[in-house]
């Protein structure tokens, strides 16, 4: 906002208050968000275990948990535009940015096993080092990551290095863990993992192999790091945390007004405008008074549109799938508690059956949605327009 040319006051912080009375402006109320608290980014980290159902459920979890950035690895497939999906060269790691924007920087060329992006001034690295990599290959991968990351001040490295170390509550330290710790020492990065909750739970055991590192400059701004109990359909747990950003993800004081024109009372609008008086004066003052009169007339003659609600479900989501997801979560907990007990086999079998039911329900619902959409589109526009009329999706199964 520019300062009044007739006085020496300024809009900059710390400027002395102008003694002249201000002209009343038609200012709409600011957002009701609490502007005293810092804006937050919600981050989800997950190894998808190359599982289609896990990637499907991730899209629903992102909506439910209001995730801003999903840092994933071992994905089932990469997503095409309009999704903001940044992947590595061999489809082992990816960063999924919600809202279609906010990516300020990305690699000039994709490299295998890791990718990165600068979002809201923060550098996010997604790394996956599968077990099939020999120690020599693992040692060769780390310098490539460090080379990309070393000069990035605000840094998150969300990874599954498949490395074991007592530093993150593993029972033993193996060669990969030693190599990894030596490499990360050059970044001055802190390990965010706390507690002993496993991030991986498989048929043969559990471990902590999904790690989150943050640069020392960023770590104090990270809150609520947690191994989530969310059901993922992967053998890895989701890690969820928040970051205090240096600036809002979206303007919190944006002034805008929208009216529902379908509710327009033209007679009321005409009366209000006929009674509006704009006395002669400086051009800027007259313009402001005119805008105030128009705003008042619109308020009196039309209803304002409600804030657009955030979509809370993907197109194929149903109450049946929600129930099956809860059943899987319950069966997984029972299977984990039964480990080493006589009923372990029965609980594992029940869990596997629940997983199959959920996977089948998602696949059936997707196919049904596409079939119904194609039928409606063919009736309305003809077969040539079917694909354009169906919902945007990562696949059609």
Image (cartoon, rainbow, N blue to C red):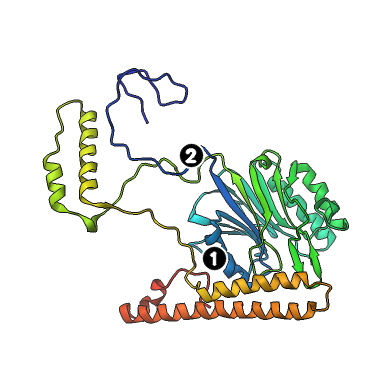
Left or right of 54, for residue 257: left
In the image, 254 versus 338, the foreground residue is 338
The answer to whether the residues at label 2 and label 1 have Cβ atoms under 8 Å apart is no
The residue where tag 2 is placed is 35
- Which image quarter holds the N terminus? top left
Depth order, front residue of 25/343: 343
Q: Which mark is residue 60?
A: 1
- Quarter assignment of residue 19: top left
On residue 237, the disc is: none
Residue 284, percent from left and from top: 24, 29
Can residue 88 be seen by looking at this rendering? no
Residue appearing at x 63%, y 50% in the figure: 124
Residue 367 picture location, percent across and down:
50, 80
Q: Position of residue 243 (x, y in %)?
A: 61, 46
Give the crowd class for mark 1: few <14, some 14-19, many >=20 residues within 10 Å. some
* Residue 290 seen in the figure: yes
- Which mark is nearer the camera, 2 or 1? 2
């Amino acid at each position: 906002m520019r300062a009044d040319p007739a006085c020496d006051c300024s809009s900059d912080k710390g400027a002395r208050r102008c003694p002249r009375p201000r002209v009343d402006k038609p200012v709409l109320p600011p957002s009701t968000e609490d502007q005293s608290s810092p804006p937050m980014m919600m981050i989800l980290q997950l190894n998808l275990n190359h599982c289609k159902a896990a990637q499907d459920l991730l899209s629903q979890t992102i909506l439910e948990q209001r995730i801003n950035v999903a840092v994933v690895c071992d994905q089932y497939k990469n997503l095409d535009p309009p999704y903001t999906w940044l992947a590595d060269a061999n489809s082992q790691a990816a960063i999924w940015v919600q809202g279609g924007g906010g990516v300020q920087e990305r690699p000039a060329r994709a490299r295998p096993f890791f990718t990165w992006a600068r979002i809201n001034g923060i550098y996010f690295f997604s790394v996956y080092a599968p077990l099939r990599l020999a120690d020599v290959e693992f040692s060769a991968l780390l310098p490539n990551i460090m080379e990309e990351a070393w000069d990035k001040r605000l840094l998150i490295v969300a990874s599954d290095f498949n490395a074991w170390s007592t530093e993150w509550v593993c029972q033993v330290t193996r060669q990969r863990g030693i190599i990894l710790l030596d490499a990360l020492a050059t970044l001055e990065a802190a390990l965010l993992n706390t507690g002993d909750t496993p991030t991986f739970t498989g048929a043969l055991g559990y471990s902590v192999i999904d790690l989150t590192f943050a640069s020392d400059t960023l770590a104090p701004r990270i809150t609520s790091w947690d191994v989530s109990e969310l059901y993922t359909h992967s053998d890895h747990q989701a890690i969820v945390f928040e970051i205090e950003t240096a600036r809002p993800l979206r303007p919190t004081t944006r002034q805008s007004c929208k009216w529902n024109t379908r509710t327009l009372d033209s007679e009321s609008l005409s009366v209000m405008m006929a009674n509006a008086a704009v006395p002669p004066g400086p051009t800027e003052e007259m313009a402001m008074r005119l805008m105030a009169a128009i705003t008042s007339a619109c308020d009196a003659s039309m209803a304002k549109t409600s804030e657009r609600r955030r979509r809370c479900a993907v197109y194929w989501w149903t109450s049946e799938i929600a129930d099956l997801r809860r059943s899987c979560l319950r069966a997984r907990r029972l299977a984990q508690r039964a480990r080493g007990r006589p009923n372990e086999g029965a609980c594992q079998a029940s869990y596997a059956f629940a997983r199959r039911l959920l996977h089948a329900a998602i696949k059936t619902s997707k196919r049904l949605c596409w079939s119904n959409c194609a039928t409606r589109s063919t009736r309305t526009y003809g077969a040539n327009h079917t694909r354009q009329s169906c919902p945007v999706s990562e696949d059609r199964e």
